[in-house]
Amino acid sequence: MKTVLEGRPALEKEVMQVAEVAGYLWQNGWAERNGGNITVNITEHVDDDIRTLPAISEVMRIGETLPYLKGQYFFCKGTGKRMRDLARRPMENASIIRILDDCASYVIIADHPVLPTSELPSHLAVHNRQLELGSGNKATVHTHPIELIAMSHNPAFLGKDVLSRLLWSMIPETKAFCPLGLGIVPYTLPGSVEMAKATMEELEAYDVVMWEKHGVFAKGTDVMAAFDQIDVLSKSAKIYLDCRAMGFEPTGMSDEQMGELTRVFGLPR
């Protein structure tokens, strides 16, 4: 079967980057069964021929009106699909969707009628807000990093910015590459409206949000940038837990040392 990627190297590169990240999520043990989701705004890679492609699905409702998404196109992991399969066969385990002019519904246009993730409305709401802000963020990633989830089971870490400061202090790169830190959403029913609203609120101040006892949600300029932020936070969590497993509480970098990083590299305070 002919794929919409043929003759479109920029679009193919974007999709293959999603496949690459999906493989990393699986290899890290962050994507059991069909766990996790990836959604990327690919509108900049859509040409006139794609715009005229007929729908291969019925019209589906988003559940709310998202005015900044009019005429936007997204590559979305399919519901029930596994990250390990997305990594190997991205166009069979995801779909390209077109947001309709009512900004409240969408259709699938390629390659197969693979129904997008059930969490699509939450992802699209984040994309709508990023377009409203003009942030340049085009990718959202949800996954289940083992050590970060383990740390979210300790109430002592769930106060505002407690976990951010701890993780920043483990290794300089964490502050450098995830300077806004980690927002916290207390446990909420997965996929609920309450979770979506709480995530949106936290994403106003953070690029990565921890869903207590569940996983993380990240936004980035592309899917690799979103993954990188989760990766550095996870590395810090591993360092902390390895120190504890060796029988001691890690000292971490001091406030003075982290302040020096902030000044020298011009990081957000």
Image (cartoon, rainbow, N blue to C red):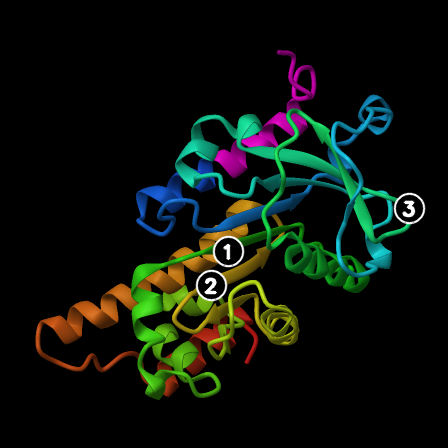
Asked if 117 appears above or below 10 in the picture, the reply is below
- Residue 32 percent across, percent down from the top left: 35, 48
Q: Residues within 10 Å of mark 3 (few under 14, many from 20)?
A: few
Label 1: state its secondary structure: strand
Residue at far front of view: 58
At 48% from the left and 86% from the top, the residue drawn is: 160
Q: Which residues are magenta?
A: 1-19
Q: Earlier in the sequence, mark 2 or mark 3?
A: 3
Residue at far right of view: 101
Instruction: Say left or right for 6 vs 156.
Output: right
Answer with the quarter of the image where residue 94 lies. top right
Task: Give yes or no for contact between labels 1 and 2 (Cβ–Cβ under 8 Å).
Answer: yes
- The residue pinned by badge 3 equals 101
Three-letter code for the amino acid on which mark 3 is drawn: Asp
Label 3: state its secondary structure: loop
Q: Residues within 10 Å of mark 2 (few under 14, many from 20)?
A: many
At 38% from the left and 86% from the top, the residue drawn is: 256
Three-letter code for the amino acid on which mark 2 is drawn: Val
- The CA distance from mark 1 to mark 3 is 27 Å
- The CA distance from mark 1 to mark 2 is 6 Å
Residue 216, label in figure: 2
Q: Earlier in the sequence, mark 1 or mark 2?
A: 1
- The residue pinned by badge 1 equals 142
